[in-house]
């Protein structure tokens, strides 16, 4: 029993539920942001303003500007571990693909219990902060100056490397 009267298992479930809620709010904010950008672009067109190149780009079905039209980008290699199940690797890849600052996933390499993702990231993106919002698992991040990032996931059952 913890000092608050609940079991450790109950507390862990509460933490996981909170993480899931944070991820959901992050996704909702991204969607809301794209709607605000669409409205601002439409208001600019109605007012006769030239707008920015991003305003002029066609919107996708989700309302977001295609990522190829974004500004300068560079490749960043992200190593994620441990990923003992294929579904966990898929979750990590899906989370990385959906980041606002990621133009595309250039390559994916899966190994025993880890994966390496090469991402095309818009210059100036705070990649670690974006990942913290999107990834439903806590992690420790180790960055290097050479365009590499390592994420050590902290799964609820205590697997951490």
Image (cartoon, helix red, strand yellow):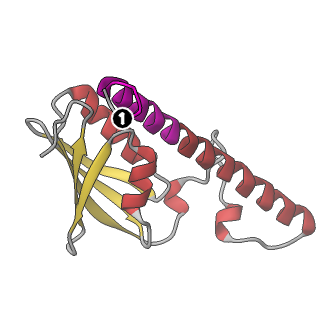
Question: Which residue is drawn at the image coordinates 39% and 38% (left, top)?
Answer: 136
Marks counted in the figure total: 1
The spot of residue 157 in percent (x, y) is: 21, 30
- The residue under label 1 is 3
- Up-down relation of residue 86 to residue 22 (above or below): above
Residue nearest the observer in this picture, 99 or 131:
131
Residue 90 appears left or right of 48: left
- Up-down relation of residue 158 to residue 68 (above or below): above
Residue 121 appears left or right of 117: right
The spot of residue 28 in percent (x, y) is: 61, 41
The spot of residue 145 in percent (x, y) is: 22, 75
Q: Which residues are magenta?
A: 3-23
Label 1 secondary element: loop
Question: Which residue is drawn at the image coordinates 16% and 42% (left, top)?
Answer: 160
Residue 32 appears left or right of 75: right
Residue 34 appears left or right of 133: right
Residue 113 drawn in magenta: no
Residue nearest the observer in this picture, 74 or 24:
24
Residue nearest the observer in this picture, 107 or 124:
124
The spot of residue 56 in percent (x, y) is: 70, 63
Classified by dominant secondary structure, the portion drawn in magenta counts as helix
Instruction: Tell me the quarter of the picture where residue 125 sits.
Output: bottom left
Residue 4 drawn in magenta: yes
The crowd level at tag 1 (other Cα within 10 Å; few <14, some 14-19, many 20+) is few
Question: Which residue is drawn at the image coordinates 84% and 72% (left, top)?
Answer: 49
Which quadrant of the rendered structure holds the N terminus? top left
Question: Which residue is drawn at the image coordinates 27% and 26% (left, top)?
Answer: 87
- Most distant residue in the right direction: 47
């Amino acid at each position: 029993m913890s000092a608050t009267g609940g079991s450790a298992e109950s507390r862990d479930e509460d933490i996981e539920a909170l993480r899931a809620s944070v991820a959901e709010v992050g996704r909702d904010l991204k969607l809301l942001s794209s709607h605000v950008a669409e409205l601002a672009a439409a208001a600019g067109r109605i007012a006769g303003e030239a707008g920015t190149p991003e305003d002029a780009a066609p919107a996708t079905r989700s309302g977001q500007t295609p990522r190829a039209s974004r500004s300068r980008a560079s490749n960043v290699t992200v190593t994620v571990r441990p990923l003992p199940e294929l579904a966990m690797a898929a979750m990590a890849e899906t989370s990385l693909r959906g980041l606002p600052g990621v133009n595309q996933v250039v390559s994916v390499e899966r190994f025993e219990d880890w994966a390496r993702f090469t991402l095309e990231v818009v210059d100036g993106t705070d990649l670690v902060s974006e990942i913290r919002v999107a990834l439903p698992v806590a992690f420790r991040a180790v960055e290097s100056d050479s365009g590499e990032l390592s994420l050590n996931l902290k799964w609820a059952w205590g697997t951490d490397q």
